[in-house]
Protein backbone atom coordinates (compact mmCIF):
# COMPACT_ATOMS: atom_id res chain seq x y z
CA UNK A 1 0.00 0.00 0.00
CA UNK A 2 1.14 3.45 -0.84
CA UNK A 3 0.88 5.96 1.91
CA UNK A 4 -0.45 9.30 0.78
CA UNK A 5 0.10 12.38 2.80
CA UNK A 6 -2.51 15.08 2.90
CA UNK A 7 -1.32 18.60 2.53
CA UNK A 8 -2.95 21.05 4.90
CA UNK A 9 -5.46 23.29 3.23
CA UNK A 10 -4.50 26.93 3.08
CA UNK A 11 -6.40 28.94 5.64
CA UNK A 12 -8.67 31.60 4.32
CA UNK A 13 -9.55 34.65 6.37
CA UNK A 14 -12.74 34.35 8.36
CA UNK A 15 -15.56 35.74 6.20
CA UNK A 16 -16.82 39.23 6.83
CA UNK A 17 -13.88 40.42 8.86
CA UNK A 18 -12.77 44.02 8.36
CA UNK A 19 -9.63 44.49 6.29
CA UNK A 20 -8.78 47.52 8.44
CA UNK A 21 -9.45 48.30 12.07
CA UNK A 22 -10.69 51.85 12.52
CA UNK A 23 -11.91 53.65 15.63
CA UNK A 24 -15.49 52.60 16.46
CA UNK A 25 -18.37 54.88 15.60
CA UNK A 26 -19.49 57.04 18.53
CA UNK A 27 -22.62 55.59 20.17
CA UNK A 28 -24.89 58.36 18.88
CA UNK A 29 -23.72 57.90 15.26
CA UNK A 30 -24.07 54.12 15.50
CA UNK A 31 -27.59 54.49 16.94
CA UNK A 32 -28.55 56.93 14.15
CA UNK A 33 -27.21 54.53 11.50
CA UNK A 34 -29.09 51.63 13.10
CA UNK A 35 -32.32 53.64 13.20
CA UNK A 36 -31.92 54.66 9.55
CA UNK A 37 -31.25 51.08 8.43
CA UNK A 38 -34.19 49.88 10.53
CA UNK A 39 -36.48 52.24 8.63
CA UNK A 40 -34.96 52.19 5.14
CA UNK A 41 -32.98 48.96 4.94
CA UNK A 42 -29.45 48.82 3.53
CA UNK A 43 -29.32 51.40 0.74
CA UNK A 44 -25.53 51.39 0.19
CA UNK A 45 -23.91 47.98 -0.46
CA UNK A 46 -20.87 46.94 1.53
CA UNK A 47 -17.57 46.60 -0.35
CA UNK A 48 -15.81 43.25 0.10
CA UNK A 49 -12.86 41.46 -1.47
CA UNK A 50 -12.88 38.04 -3.11
CA UNK A 51 -12.30 36.43 0.33
CA UNK A 52 -15.30 38.28 1.78
CA UNK A 53 -13.18 40.58 3.91
CA UNK A 54 -15.00 43.89 4.39
CA UNK A 55 -13.23 46.84 2.81
CA UNK A 56 -16.07 49.24 3.56
CA UNK A 57 -19.33 48.78 5.46
CA UNK A 58 -18.51 46.94 8.71
CA UNK A 59 -21.16 48.81 10.67
CA UNK A 60 -23.81 48.38 7.95
CA UNK A 61 -23.07 44.66 7.82
CA UNK A 62 -23.23 44.31 11.61
CA UNK A 63 -26.52 46.18 11.86
CA UNK A 64 -28.07 44.27 8.94
CA UNK A 65 -27.08 40.99 10.57
CA UNK A 66 -28.51 42.08 13.93
CA UNK A 67 -31.79 43.12 12.28
CA UNK A 68 -31.99 40.05 10.06
CA UNK A 69 -31.80 42.12 6.87
CA UNK A 70 -30.07 41.13 3.65
CA UNK A 71 -26.86 43.08 3.09
CA UNK A 72 -26.01 43.78 -0.55
CA UNK A 73 -22.35 43.44 -1.51
CA UNK A 74 -20.01 44.77 -4.14
CA UNK A 75 -17.03 42.47 -4.70
CA UNK A 76 -13.76 44.24 -5.55
CA UNK A 77 -11.33 41.73 -7.00
CA UNK A 78 -7.64 41.91 -7.77
CA UNK A 79 -6.39 44.38 -5.18
CA UNK A 80 -3.30 43.71 -3.09
CA UNK A 81 -3.68 43.74 0.70
CA UNK A 82 -2.02 47.16 0.79
CA UNK A 83 -4.45 48.52 -1.82
CA UNK A 84 -7.42 47.11 0.13
CA UNK A 85 -6.27 48.81 3.34
CA UNK A 86 -5.61 52.08 1.52
CA UNK A 87 -9.02 51.97 -0.13
CA UNK A 88 -10.68 51.27 3.23
CA UNK A 89 -8.82 54.19 4.74
CA UNK A 90 -9.72 56.56 1.88
CA UNK A 91 -13.41 55.66 1.94
CA UNK A 92 -13.70 55.93 5.71
CA UNK A 93 -11.61 59.07 6.22
CA UNK A 94 -13.63 60.92 3.59
CA UNK A 95 -16.96 59.95 5.12
CA UNK A 96 -16.59 59.29 8.85
CA UNK A 97 -16.73 61.94 11.50
CA UNK A 98 -13.25 61.38 12.92
CA UNK A 99 -11.46 64.04 14.90
CA UNK A 100 -8.25 65.43 13.45
CA UNK A 101 -6.30 63.40 16.01
CA UNK A 102 -8.07 60.16 15.02
CA UNK A 103 -7.36 60.90 11.35
CA UNK A 104 -3.69 61.51 12.20
CA UNK A 105 -3.54 58.19 14.07
CA UNK A 106 -5.03 56.25 11.15
CA UNK A 107 -2.67 58.00 8.72
CA UNK A 108 0.35 57.36 10.98
CA UNK A 109 -0.49 53.65 11.08
CA UNK A 110 -0.22 53.49 7.29
CA UNK A 111 2.93 55.59 7.15
CA UNK A 112 4.55 53.27 9.69
CA UNK A 113 3.79 50.38 7.32
CA UNK A 114 5.39 52.27 4.45
CA UNK A 115 2.10 52.71 2.57
CA UNK A 116 1.94 55.92 0.60
CA UNK A 117 -0.48 58.26 -1.07
CA UNK A 118 0.84 57.22 -4.50
CA UNK A 119 -0.51 53.73 -3.92
CA UNK A 120 -3.77 55.28 -2.78
CA UNK A 121 -4.09 57.08 -6.12
CA UNK A 122 -3.56 53.82 -8.02
CA UNK A 123 -6.13 52.15 -5.78
CA UNK A 124 -8.70 54.87 -6.43
CA UNK A 125 -8.13 54.54 -10.17
CA UNK A 126 -8.63 50.76 -9.96
CA UNK A 127 -12.07 51.29 -8.38
CA UNK A 128 -13.50 51.88 -11.82
CA UNK A 129 -13.76 48.10 -12.35
CA UNK A 130 -16.29 46.69 -9.89
CA UNK A 131 -18.32 43.48 -10.02
CA UNK A 132 -21.52 43.39 -8.07
CA UNK A 133 -23.01 40.44 -6.24
CA UNK A 134 -25.99 40.26 -6.25
CA UNK A 135 -27.11 42.41 -9.15
CA UNK A 136 -28.82 45.41 -7.65
CA UNK A 137 -31.65 45.90 -10.13
CA UNK A 138 -34.40 46.51 -7.60
CA UNK A 139 -35.12 49.98 -6.28
CA UNK A 140 -36.49 48.44 -3.08
CA UNK A 141 -34.21 48.62 -0.03
CA UNK A 142 -32.71 45.40 1.27
CA UNK A 143 -34.57 44.28 4.39
Image (cartoon, rainbow, N blue to C red):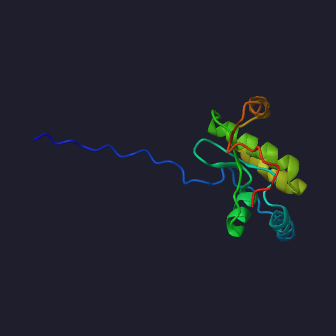
Percent from the top left, x then y, of residue 137?
76, 43
Q: Is residue 9 above or below residue 36?
A: above
Percent from the top left, x then y, of residue 132?
70, 40
Q: Quadrant of the C terminus?
A: bottom right
Q: Residue at x 82, y 49 (%)?
A: 139
The answer to whether residue 114 shows anywhere in this view is no
Left or right relative to 134: residue 117:
right
Percent from the top left, x then y, of residue 112?
71, 43
Q: Residue at x 54, y 50 (%)?
A: 13
Of 117 and 133, which appears nearest the observer? 133
Left or right relative to 140: residue 65:
left
Of 126 and 20, which appears nearest the observer? 126
Q: Residue at x 74, y 56 (%)?
A: 22
Of 116 and 35, which appears nearest the observer? 35
Q: Is residue 115 above or below residue 43?
A: above
Left or right relative to 132: residue 6:
left
Q: Residue at x 79, y 31 (%)?
A: 121
Q: Is residue 8 above or below residue 66?
A: above
Amino acid sequence: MTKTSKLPRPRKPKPYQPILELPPLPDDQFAALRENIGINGILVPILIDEDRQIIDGCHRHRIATDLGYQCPEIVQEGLSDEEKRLLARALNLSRRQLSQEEKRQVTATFENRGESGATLSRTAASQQVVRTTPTLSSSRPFR
